[in-house]
Image: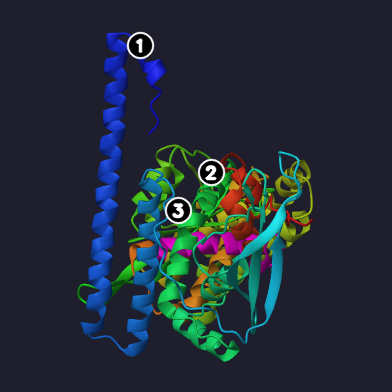
């Protein structure tokens, strides 16, 4: 909070009162936020040290403890950001254990661009400062030795050193490459930190999982503004996909898990932007979808889950998933070889054949083909379904398959009149499938904050993949540039806009 004393002296009494009220409100907000984070930090510490007494298996306890360490690191980073900038003091920092001498070293020298002092004298090198960062290329540890030469002027007694670019974890040992490796292994390859500890041990240095967890927590906090910017980008699109999948979340107080949900949102399959944002929530309540979408009003392609219905009553346009309707008849045919189901499947197949043909067409061409070919097929299918429904029992499996389509027919066929709408929600289901496949390795999310951090990092990883990037190369470059990158230009680091620094 910066106060310009000269500007204050020029204000009248009423303006001073308004300024004082605004500053007081900001102070109260900062104090409340600080108290909230301090409380959360204290709670996490209590859970961390109480975890050993809870009755979990060794593997479950390891997963819980590493998530608590990550949460603690993230909260402490946020608290640190709220504190006012303190002047640099000569207080001695605790020394960390030196990195093993047997690891290969790669020296990076930082020297002044000019060794001539401002007074005109030639500088003399009087020493150097050395900082070591631990780097990792899959299977091999190396050490970066950052050597900053000290140059002094004998005449004016000045000391010159070349600056070193800031790191994501300035006072830690990891390079951006090592941090990217930990994040990709945890969130893309589904390797818990206790497994990574063993893998690193075989490479020559067993990094404690508590340390790895602190790195993950700090990186999650530093990457969050990038994910917020990605969310803003996708909400600018008129067409969105939405889907959700269950994930177990641990309640450390009683050692039990309950069903949380990972929601996924992505621009439409025909939109130019290739991105996905995951939103981890404690439940499947529709309020989570409404909170994410906010004031967005467009066409949402989704299944028939009731949680989206409130959004449709507030101006969001429902676009149904034809694949879900087809699946009802597929299940019916698989169960009893129903002739009704067989005929319906044949008509869906004709529509999907047309959809394969229009994928590469322009929007006007896609609309024309759908109107000429898909519309007659779907109109005839609808009339046939109405007639069949009149002849089957109300509680039969056939009736349920027919009712699913008939009750949602307008939403299911909306794509015929809108060329930007795909016929189904398969685009987002393919984005959420890797998450579902990884659940067997996660066991559970250790906390709400841990789930939200996982959702944030996975948003960047999956979006990078969608744009043809190697997630490791992307995260390594972003983590290298992020500490010095202007917040106003954060969109340059989004996966669909990113270009490597050396490109």
The disc, 3 or 2, on the residue closer to the chain's N-terminal end is 2
Q: Which mark is residue 160?
A: none
Q: Does residue 31 show up magenta in the picture?
A: no
The 10 Å Cα crowd at callout 2, few under 14, some 14 to 19, many 20 or more, is few
The disc, 3 or 1, on the residue closer to the chain's N-terminal end is 1
Residue 80 percent coordinates (x, y): 38, 52
Q: Secondary structure at mark 2?
A: helix
Q: Nearer the viewer, mark 3 or mark 2?
A: 2
Distance between the Cα atoms at labels 1 and 2?
Answer: 38 Å
Highlighted range, magenta:
450-473
Farthest residue in the top direction?
12
Which residue is identified by label 3? Answer: 407
Do tag 1 and tag 2 residues touch (Cβ < 8 Å)?
A: no
Q: Which mark is residue 11?
A: 1
Query: Could you tell me which quadrant the N terminus lies in?
Result: top left
Q: Which mark is residue 232?
A: 2
The disc, 1 or 2, on the residue closer to the chain's N-terminal end is 1
> Is any atom of residue 319 visible in this view?
no
> Is any atom of residue 142 visible in this view?
yes
| Residue located at (56% from left, 49% from top) | 230
Q: Secondary structure at mark 3?
A: helix
């Amino acid at each position: 909070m910066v106060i310009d004393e000269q500007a204050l002296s020029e204000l009248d009494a009423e303006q001073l009162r308004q300024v004082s009220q605004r500053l007081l409100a900001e102070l109260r907000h900062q104090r409340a936020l600080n108290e909230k984070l301090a409380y959360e930090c204290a709670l996490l510490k209590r859970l961390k040290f109480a975890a050993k007494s809870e009755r979990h298996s060794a593997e479950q306890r390891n997963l819980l403890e590493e998530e608590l360490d990550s949460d603690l690191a993230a909260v402490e980073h946020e608290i640190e950001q709220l504190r006012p900038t303190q002047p640099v003091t000569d207080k001695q920092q605790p020394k960390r254990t030196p990195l093993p001498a047997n690891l290969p070293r790669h020296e990076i020298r930082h020297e002044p661009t000019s060794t001539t002092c401002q007074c005109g004298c030639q500088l003399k090198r009087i020493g150097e400062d050395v900082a070591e960062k631990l780097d990792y290329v899959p299977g091999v540890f190396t050490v970066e030795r950052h050597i900053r030469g000290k140059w002094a002027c004998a005449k004016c007694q000045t000391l010159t050193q070349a600056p070193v670019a800031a790191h994501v974890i300035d006072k830690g040992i990891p390079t951006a490459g090592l941090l990217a490796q930990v994040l990709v292994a945890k969130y893309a390859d589904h390797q818990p930190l206790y497994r990574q500890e063993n893998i690193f041990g075989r490479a020559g240095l067993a990094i404690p999982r508590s340390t790895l967890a602190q790195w993950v927590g700090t990186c999650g906090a530093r990457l969050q503004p990038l994910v917020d910017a990605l969310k803003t980008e996708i909400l600018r699109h008129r067409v969105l996909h939405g889907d959700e999948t269950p994930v177990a979340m641990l309640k450390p107080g009683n050692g039990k898990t309950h069903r949380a949900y990972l929601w996924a949102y992505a621009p439409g399959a025909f939109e130019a932007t290739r991105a996905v944002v995951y939103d981890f929530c404690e439940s499947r309540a529709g309020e989570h979808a409404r909170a994410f979408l906010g004031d967005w009003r467009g066409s949402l392609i989704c299944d028939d889950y009731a949680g989206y219905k409130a959004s449709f009553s507030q101006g969001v346009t429902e676009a149904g998933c034809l694949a879900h309707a087809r699946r009802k008849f597929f299940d019916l045919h698989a169960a009893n070889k129903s002739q009704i189901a067989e005929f319906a499947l044949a008509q869906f197949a004709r529509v999907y054949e047309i959809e394969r043909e229009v994928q590469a067409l322009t929007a006007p061409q896609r609309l024309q083909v759908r109107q000429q070919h898909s519309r007659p097929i779907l109109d005839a299918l609808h009339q046939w379904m109405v007639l069949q429904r009149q002849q089957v029992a109300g509680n039969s499996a056939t009736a349920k398959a027919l009712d699913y389509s008939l009750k949602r027919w307008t939403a299911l066929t909306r794509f015929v009149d809108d060329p930007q709408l795909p016929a189904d929600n398969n685009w987002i289901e393919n984005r959420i499938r890797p998450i579902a496949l990884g659940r067997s390795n996660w066991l559970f999310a250790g906390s709400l904050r841990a789930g939200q951090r996982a959702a944030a990092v996975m948003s960047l990883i999956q979006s990078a993949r969608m744009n043809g990037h190697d997630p490791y190369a992307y995260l390594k470059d972003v983590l290298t540039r992020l500490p010095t990158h202007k917040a106003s230009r954060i969109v340059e680091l989004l996966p669909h806009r990113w270009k490597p620094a050396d490109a």
